[in-house]
Image (cartoon, helix red, strand yellow):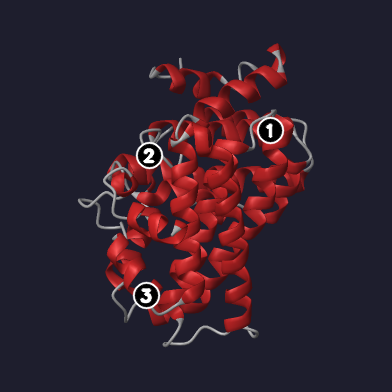
Amino acid sequence: MTHVGLFNNLFSEEFHSIEEPSQPDSIPATIYLKHALTTPYLMHQILATSALHLSTRTPESRNFYREYSAGLQNRALSLFNESNPVLEVTPANCVQMFLFSSLVGVHLLCDALHYQRDSIEVFIDGFTRCLNVYRGVLAVIDQSRHLLRETELGSVLEMSHVLMGSTDTSTSGSECDALRSLIDAADVPPSSRKAYRESLFYLQQVFDAQRAAPGNKTVFAWPVLVSPAYVDLLRQRQAEALIILAHYAVILHHSRHLWLIGNGGQFLVESISGSLGSNWQEWLKFPNAGLRGEPAS
C-alpha cells in the first residue's frame, strides 16, 4: 500500500512542479511512467523519488520517507545491475537506461541538498559521492546519444544540446569572469588551474543556457560535466573549488522554487562564505550578491 501511495503521489500537482511544460528540454513525467510500467528498476527509482519528495513535505514522516526512499533506490540499483550484467546500450534499452541514469543522478543531488547539511564538510562528502555516481549519466548519454536521437527523447536531447553547446562567445555572459581572473592570478598548480578553468567554462554555459531559456533543466547539467580532477579538489576542500561550487549555488538559488532544490543554494553560499573567512570574501562577492538578488559590484 505504501507503493500505491507513492505511485499516486506522482500525479500530485506539487510533484509535477518540477516539470516546465513550456520548456522544450523538459521530459514529461508521462514518458518516465510509460517506460517504468515495463521496467522494474525504473519503477523502483521513480517511487524512490516520490518518497524523497514526500520526505521534504511531511516533517512528521520525514525519516520514514527518506529511509524508504533509500531502500527503494538500493533495490532499483540492484535490479538495474541484474538486468544489465554487462553495461551495453542497445536500441531496446537506451531510453530506459537514460531515464534511469538521469533520475538517479538528480535524486542523489536532491538528497545531498536537503539532507547532507550538518556542516559544509558533511555536505562535500555527500556531494562528491553524488558527483561520482552522477558522472555515470554522462557515460550512458555518450554511449546512447546516436540511438536516443531516433526515439521520443530525440527532440528533448537536441534542445538540451543546443542550450548547452553554443560556441558563440558574443552571447556569453560575465557571471564567471571575475572568478576566472582571480584563478588565473592565483598561486595554484597548473593541473588545478586547468580543472578550475574547465569547471568555470561549463558553469558559464549553464548560466548562459538559463538566461536563454529560464526554467530549463540545465541546472542539473553542471555536476555531470565537471572533471574528476575538480571533484578531487572539492573533496580536499580547496578554497578555489569551494568558491566555484558557491557560484554554481547561485544557479540552484534561482531554481529554489523546485522542491528538488529548495534552499540548498542559499545553504551552500552561506556555509562556504562562513567556512572560508574574510580573506576570501572578494572571491565570494558574486555568490553573496546573487543571494540578495543584486549584481556583483
Give the amino acid at mark 1: Glu
Secondary structure, mark 2, is: loop
Mark 2 or 3: in front is 3
Tell whether 151 sits left or right of 64.
left
Q: How many marks?
A: 3
Name the residue at the left extreme: 22
Secondary structure, mark 1, is: helix
Whichever of labels 2 and 3 marks the residue nearer the N terminus, that label is 3
Give the amino acid at mark 2: Leu
Observer-nearest residue: 222 or 80? 80
Residue at coordinates 77% horizontally, 31% vertically from top-left?
187
Residue 237 appearing in the image: yes
- Residue 113, relative to residue 72: is it above or below? above
Whole-percent x, y for residue 159 in the image: 30, 61
Instruction: Say the numbered circle drawn on residue 103.
Output: none
Mark 1 or 3: in front is 3
Whichever of labels 1 and 2 marks the residue nearer the N terminus, that label is 1
User: Which residue, given by chain and number where applicable, does mark 3 sit on?
Assistant: 35
Cα separation, mark 2 vs mark 3, equals 24 Å
Mark 1 or 2: in front is 2
Q: In the figure, residue 78 lies in which quadrant?
A: bottom right
Give the amino acid at mark 3: His
User: Which residue, given by chain and number where applicable, does mark 2 sit on?
Assistant: 258
Residue at coordinates 37% horizontally, 75% vertically from top-left?
37
Instruction: Say the numbered circle drawn on residue 240.
Output: 1
Proximity of marks 2 and 3: CB atoms separated by less than 8 Å: no
Whichever of labels 1 and 3 marks the residue nearer the N terminus, that label is 3
Secondary structure, mark 3, is: helix
Proximity of marks 1 and 2: CB atoms separated by less than 8 Å: no
Residue 176 appearing in the image: no
Whole-percent x, y for residue 118 in the image: 68, 29
